[in-house]
Image: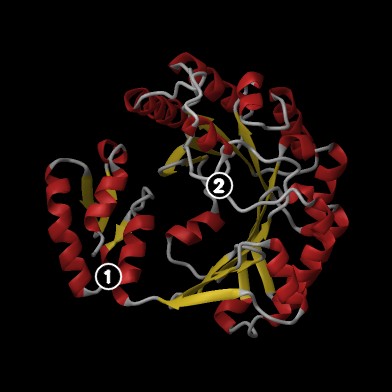
């Protein structure tokens, strides 16, 4: 089984923090959808292993900027090219795009999971992020999706805003919990080079007083405590779900499952090599229209594969299955991990190495210490 990811790069406006590839050139939507459909036919014929699709994920950008007809076109081609046995079909949506009419068409395409970027339930913070929706629209969107029969909803939250307090963050968590969604993802506001937020900080905007590391740690601990107390599983560093509602598609990235990526800037992985499409919508469309695949690829050697497993598997509560490693890599891993085991930052159970709660707060350091250089 493999996952299928389709990158939809269109956004009505650009958020201040976003570092993903996107464009506000909405006039290119139809040409882009046509190109993605043609890319499916240009790719090598799916093998038996890759031909059967277990999960589908439309990410972005903002996939809800596509029209119902464009979504229908995509799924018709997916069913034509692949053996579609997807048990989880996710679309990312902005809350203000979720009208009752739009929500009602989603199940017709097999979409049974929606991921929404709520980010905050404070309208002032939403304006700071340049989000187009309001807190009220998040609640209205969840209602519309429920009425349309969508029983698997995920929302994203963000913390670590300038001048945000622990009480502010608790109100956002409580507001999210009141929606009783199946899945929650939460991320600390990061300052990535090339974003509008980065430029504001570089200009030393005195209005931006970012929280210190101790406050960010307290916010993360509060998040874990609040969500696990009401039954959510903390199954990945930034992800929480009700039992049975882990993101199957995203779990494929963490579990070393092959996936196919379509569209500008999309990545693919078959277990032996990875490839990536050009991160430019014009170059992508023009190449596809010429019948060319605008991608590069690299073979993955044993050490690279080991490093990849360290940096993704250790993000999960299931951890790294040591039995999947070669003798050489397993010996190296355990030798480097011993000091973290001794310090209570890692734990070993049934041949699985995983982070303890204490280790979550220094996870990047731990993982960088275990990779081979």
* Position of residue 56 measured from the top left corner of the image (x, y, whole percent): 64, 61
Secondary structure of residue under mark 2: loop
| Closer-to-camera residue (304/278) | 278
What's the residue at 47%, 37% (across, down)? 190
* Position of residue 235 measured from the top left corner of the image (x, y, whole percent): 42, 45
Residue 208 shown left or right of residue 373 in the figure: right
* Position of residue 250 measured from the top left corner of the image (x, y, whole percent): 52, 55
Q: Which residue is mark 2?
A: 19
Q: Quadrant of residue 57?
A: bottom right
Q: Quadrant of residue 262?
A: bottom right
| Closer-to-camera residue (45/62) | 62
Residue 178 appears anywhere in the view = no
Q: How many marks?
A: 2
Q: Earlier in the sequence, mark 2 or mark 1?
A: 2
Q: CA distance from mark 2 to mark 1?
A: 33 Å
304 to 115, vertically: above or below: below
For label 1, count other residues whose C-alpha is less than 10 Å away and answer few (under 14), some (14-19) or many (20+).
some
| Closer-to-camera residue (316/59) | 59
* Position of residue 355 measured from the top left corner of the image (x, y, whole percent): 28, 46
Quadrant holding the N terminus: bottom right
Q: Which residue is mark 1?
A: 325
What's the residue at 23%, 64% (across, down)? 373
303 to 174, vertically: above or below: below
52 to 12, vertically: above or below: below
Residue 109 shown left or right of residue 234 in the figure: right
Which circle marks residue 109 in the picture? Answer: none
349 to 44, vertically: above or below: above
Secondary structure of residue under mark 1: loop
In the displayed orientation, state which residue is furthest to the front: 203
| Closer-to-camera residue (66/116) | 66
Report the mark closest to the observer, 2 or 1. 2
């Amino acid at each position: 089984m493999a996952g299928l990811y389709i990158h939809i790069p269109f956004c009505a406006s650009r958020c201040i923090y976003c570092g993903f590839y996107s464009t506000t050139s909405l006039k290119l939507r139809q040409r882009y959808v046509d190109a993605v459909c043609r890319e499916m036919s240009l790719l090598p014929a799916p093998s038996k292993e890759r031909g059967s699709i277990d999960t589908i994920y439309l990410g972005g950008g903002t996939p809800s900027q596509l029209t119902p007809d464009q979504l229908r076109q995509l799924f018709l081609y997916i069913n034509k090219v692949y053996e579609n046995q997807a048990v989880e079909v996710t679309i990312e949506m902005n809350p203000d795009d979720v009208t009752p009419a739009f929500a009602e068409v989603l199940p017709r395409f097999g979409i049974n999971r929606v991921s929404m970027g709520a980010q905050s339930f404070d309208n002032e913070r939403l304006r700071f992020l340049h989000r187009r929706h309001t807190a009220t629209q998040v609640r209205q969107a969840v209602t519309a999706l429920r009425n349309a029969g969508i029983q698997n909803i995920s929302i994203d939250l963000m913390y670590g805003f300038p001048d945000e307090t622990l009480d502010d963050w608790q109100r956002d968590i409580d507001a999210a919990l009141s929606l009783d969604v199946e899945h929650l993802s939460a991320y600390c506001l990061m300052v990535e080079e090339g974003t509008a937020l980065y430029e504001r900080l570089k200009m030393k905007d005195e209005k931006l007083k970012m929280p210190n590391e101790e406050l960010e740690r307290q916010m993360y601990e509060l998040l874990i405590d609040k969500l696990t107390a009401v039954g959510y599983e903390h199954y990945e560093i930034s992800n929480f779900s009700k039992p049975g509602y882990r993101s199957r598609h995203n779990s494929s990235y963490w579990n070393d499952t092959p996936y196919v990526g379509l569209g500008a800037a999309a990545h693919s992985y078959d277990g032996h090599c990875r490839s990536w499409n050009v991160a430019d919508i014009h170059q992508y469309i023009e190449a596809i229209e010429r019948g060319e695949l605008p991608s590069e690829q690299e073979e993955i050697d044993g050490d690279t594969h080991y490093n990849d497993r360290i940096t993704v598997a250790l993000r999960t509560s299931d951890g790294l299955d040591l039995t999947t490693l070669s003798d050489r890599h397993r010996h190296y891993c355990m030798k480097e991990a011993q000091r973290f085991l001794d310090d209570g930052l890692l734990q070993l159970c049934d041949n699985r190495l995983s982070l303890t709660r204490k280790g979550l707060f220094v996870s990047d350091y731990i993982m960088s210490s275990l990779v081979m250089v």
